[in-house]
């Protein structure tokens, strides 16, 4: 295993006190409180993990939280690394690679996103059916890493079976859940209205600055992914309103409870 993944994995394993998480949950902007839902929480600050950085973005805490949720041992990543912070695609994907090395087989990724589909207003929860990677980055560029496929198939990047499960849980728990394509851009600027029209033309329903690189690394390792976007705002030009990160975090916090109920139900329904 490459040194960066090995060092992070060894450090985290040493702090897990024998716990063996089977599911990872990546928490997007403002969605950190989801980690408070896990019982018997054990917190590992990023400062104790080699290769991990302290997040620079408000709404991203900078700790792993291991605990029980929906009858499983889960590992929550509270704070992610974005390429727009100046991180390489490798750093962005490091937590996911470490999850794989820890033996985790299923990853639930959440994010905050702008709604491009006019039907997906602020507060919409959108199950990601597929993505388009327009970040210009890819964590698989470079020497092939141990345990990874050189040319991973992306047909089922957002696992079909997990999507069926998510929809079933949403129905049972009476949570409205849309479904659509997530387009990942580099950021950190929000898009121009012309860019949002481009995203719509290319088939994107929501737009954001994360997730796609992590899913690519996960697929190269054969891990199953499920993605849920919280639409925190209408994308630029869809409404007259200007965008700001505080609004993104506010809406994410409001929807957080519902997203938490959805995630808990999904974890409960997992076979892993
Ligand atoms: N664009 C890109 N990323 C985002 C947005 C947006 O409108 N909202 C939240 N994250």
Image (tube, rainbow, N blue to C red):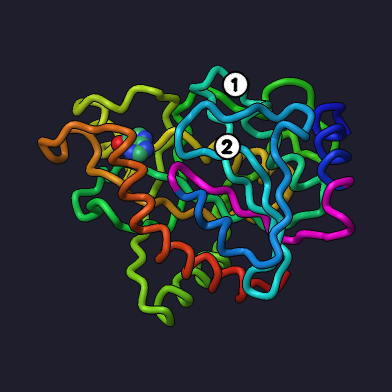
Residue lying farthest to the top in this orientation: 86
Upstream in sequence: badge 1 or badge 2: 2
Q: Secondary structure at mark 2?
A: loop
Q: Quadrant of the C terminus?
A: bottom right
Between 16 and 216, the one lying in front of the other is: 16
Q: Quadrant of the N terminus?
A: top right
The answer to whether marks 1 and 2 mark residues whose Cβ atoms lie closer than 8 Å is no
The answer to whether residue 205 is left or right of residue 52 is: left
The answer to whether residue 161 is left or right of residue 253 is: right
Residue lying farthest to the bottom in this orientation: 172
Residue that numbered label 2 is attached to: 80
Quadrant where ligand 1 appears: top left
Residues drawn in magenta: 14-30
Image coordinates of residue 235 in percent, x first then y, are: 24, 38
Q: Determine the residue positioned at 56% across, 59% down.
A: 36
Residue that numbered label 1 is attached to: 87
Viewer can see residue 95: yes
Residue lying farthest to the left in this orientation: 240
10 Å neighbourhood of mark 2: few (<14), some, or many (≥20)?
Answer: many
The answer to which image quadrant residue 79 occupies is top right
Image coordinates of residue 98 in percent, x first then y, are: 76, 41
Indicate yes or no whether the magenta region holds residue 142: no
Q: Which mark is residue 222?
A: none
Image coordinates of residue 111 in percent, x first then y, are: 46, 46
Image coordinates of residue 201 in percent, x first then y, are: 26, 37
């Amino acid at each position: 295993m490459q040194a960066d993944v090995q060092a992070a994995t060894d450090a985290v394993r040493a702090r897990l006190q024998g716990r063996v998480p089977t599911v990872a949950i990546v928490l997007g902007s403002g969605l950190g409180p989801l980690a408070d839902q896990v019982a018997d929480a054990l917190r590992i600050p990023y400062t104790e993990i080699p290769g991990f950085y302290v997040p620079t973005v408000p709404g991203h805490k900078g700790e792993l939280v291991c605990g029980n949720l929906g009858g499983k041992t889960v590992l929550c990543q509270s704070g992610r690394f974005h390429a727009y912070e100046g991180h390489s695609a490798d750093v962005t994907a490091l937590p996911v690679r470490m999850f794989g090395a820890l033996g985790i087989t299923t990853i639930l990724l959440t994010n905050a996103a702008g709604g491009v589909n006019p039907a997906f207003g602020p507060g919409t929860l959108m199950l990601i059916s597929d993505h388009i990677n327009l970040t210009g980055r890819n964590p698989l560029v470079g020497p092939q890493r141990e345990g990874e496929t050189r040319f991973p198939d992306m047909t089922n990047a957002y696992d079909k079976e997990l999507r069926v499960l998510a929809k079933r849980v949403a129905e049972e728990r009476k949570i409205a859940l849309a479904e659509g394509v997530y387009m990942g851009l580099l950021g950190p600027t929000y898009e121009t209205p012309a860019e949002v029209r481009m995203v719509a033309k290319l088939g994107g329903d929501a737009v954001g600055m994360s997730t796609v690189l992590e899913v690519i690394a996960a697929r190269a390792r054969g891990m199953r992914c499920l993605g849920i976007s919280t639409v925190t705002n209408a994308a630029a030009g869809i409404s007259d309103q200007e965008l700001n990160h505080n609004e993104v975090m506010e809406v994410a916090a409001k929807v957080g409870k519902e997203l938490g109920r959805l995630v808990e139900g999904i974890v409960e329904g997992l076979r892993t």
